[in-house]
Amino acid sequence: MRERVQTYFEQLQNTICKKLEDVDGKGKFIEDAWQHSESGGGKTHILQNGYVFEKAGVNFSAITSSLSEPLATKLNVASQKIFATGVSLVIHPYSPMIPTTHLNVRFLQLSQGDAFAENGDAWFGGGMDLTPYYLFEEDAKHFHSVLKNVCDKHDSNFYPRFKKWCDEYFFIKHRNEVRGIGGIFFDYLKDDLEKTFSFVQDVGNSFLDAYIPIVKKRKHESYSEHEKEWQLIRRGRYVEFNLVYDRGTLFGLETQGRTESILMSLPPEVKWKYDFSPQKNSREEMLLQVLQNPKEWV
Amino acid sequence: MRERVQTYFEQLQNTICKKLEDVDGKGKFIEDAWQHSESGGGKTHILQNGYVFEKAGVNFSAITSSLSEPLATKLNVASQKIFATGVSLVIHPYSPMIPTTHLNVRFLQLSQGDAFAENGDAWFGGGMDLTPYYLFEEDAKHFHSVLKNVCDKHDSNFYPRFKKWCDEYFFIKHRNEVRGIGGIFFDYLKDDLEKTFSFVQDVGNSFLDAYIPIVKKRKHESYSEHEKEWQLIRRGRYVEFNLVYDRGTLFGLETQGRTESILMSLPPEVKWKYDFSPQKNSREEMLLQVLQNPKEWV
């Protein structure tokens, strides 16, 4: 299972990067291969200063890490080691009319004592979500429709369950708002690993269908300095979520992961203004209302 | 004690803000008075887009907060409530030749059950530190000399102890570097509250002597776009420290503090570039060497 999953993840990384380059038309991904301090490693693909994308990071990794005692306690497991492989991407376009997006698919396995058994405790997790700066309802509906279709192919409970999980996971408590307009999020899927792997592949393969049509539709729209400024301020919320709450980020930092690959999710440029509020009845305020009260899109 | 401490902290906030306005010559502090969701509140003073200072926040607060069970466990106390009062400031100048600085002085008291006793468990904490973007040895020496003099007046062990504590506290583990060139940091000083209060007042009162001469010396120095860019990238480390590690920030967010007042420490503009390294033997690299190997300045 491990090897098949890894092979699929590596292919997914390449497929996605190739398509993103096509759509960008200028930027090229560079590859950084790295070794984990303990065992395993990864390949970070990064595109900076493209035509459409200001910063796009697509990371593949497959590592084995010792679990420190506090971390094992937090995860509520008695294992000494954890194997983790996955693809994680975050795309920050220049234009505030194009949303930021995030995809993660991952497979984890716990050791029994200090060895990994074929039937050891293992699970899949993942999801994808959209973080717009200006809300286009048709884009939100398109994104969620693609995800609902993928989920419904496997289990009619998946979409409602994973959509809700996503809104809960990406909640920024100290701002009383969610990071974006959501998508799906799932974790600890371990009941039937073969079936779940098939679902996870469909999720990974649907990413380009969910995101690229939105990029193509919005990339020629003009925007003002004021709108760009709003994007920079909103990107601050992205940073706040990732550094204060995101389990993947904190897990990576705690297990001595490769810092640059973990933090490639951070936006290229960000502003923090004291106590900034958008004008009443503005498009900016409309976005906030949706972030404070997540909606059903399909 | 509580009232005398609060009165001093409020005076300190006003003295510091007045002097910062004088030195800036253009920017003015606005005051935001706020109430804590449970009890107490504070006054946030903020100056944005001055002549010298891009963002300067000076916060006074005095709140009583319930301790959640996880937080009480983390603090290793059986109390139900905590009283906290303090002044906290962070100054982000425009020029990369002027360092960012941070000061905090605080007094905390734990309840016995749900009431506060006159002789209940209480302590002082605080410190100040400097985060330069370019290293001027004479500035580092000046800053540390002022702090050493203040400490030596009270106890000859204070400066070495609190200087070391500062370097340890502001260590950014995932970057293997400290946030800046340090200063002093102390916490849980509870042995003789009267004497400690006198020390804390001396620390607060020394802030302007420690920082303002550096601002005056550096504010007319010119700088290049390249140097400004370096500052924006380094500010990213400031964000990483504050959101991932800073106990004050995380304590504030966990106790439902006023988010805008807690996060006013975040820089006005920040950049994250993937895997950026300065050129060999550059002034930027010289700074990194000091951040990776904290020095004795006096």
Image (tube, coloured by chain):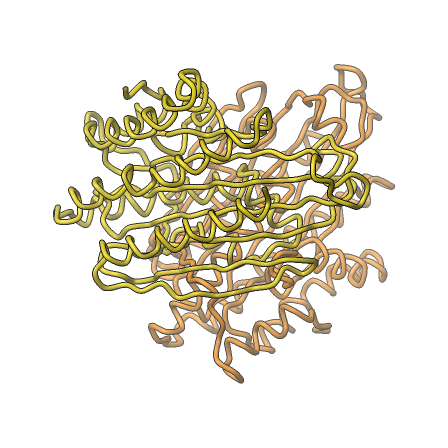
Chain colours: A yellow, B orange
Residue under the point 69% across and 23% down: B67
Choose between A124 and B162: the one closer to the eye.
Answer: A124
Q: Residue B252: give x, y in percent of width and height.
A: 58, 34
Choose between A243 and B96: the one closer to the eye.
Answer: A243
Task: Please state if B155 lies on the left or on the right of B250 as rendered.
Answer: right
Residue under the point 54% across and 40% down: A244
Task: Please state if B202 lies on the left or on the right of B39 as rendered.
Answer: right
- Using the image, determine if residue B292 lies above or below residue A40: below
Q: In what quadrant of the picture does the C terminus of chain A appear?
A: top left
- Using the image, determine if residue B200 lies above or below residue B250: below
Q: Is residue B60 visible in the rendered structure shown here?
A: yes
The quarter of the picture where residue B161 lies is bottom right
Q: In what quadrant of the picture does the N terminus of chain A appear?
A: top right
Q: Residue B58: give x, y in percent of width and height.
A: 50, 45
Residue under the point 66% across and 20% down: B66
Choose between A97 and A128: the one closer to the eye.
Answer: A128
Q: Residue A217: give x, y in percent of width and height.
A: 15, 42
Q: Is residue B1 visible in the rendered structure shown here?
A: no
How many numbered dots are placed on residues in this image?
A: 0
Q: Residue B181: give x, y in percent of width and height.
A: 63, 66
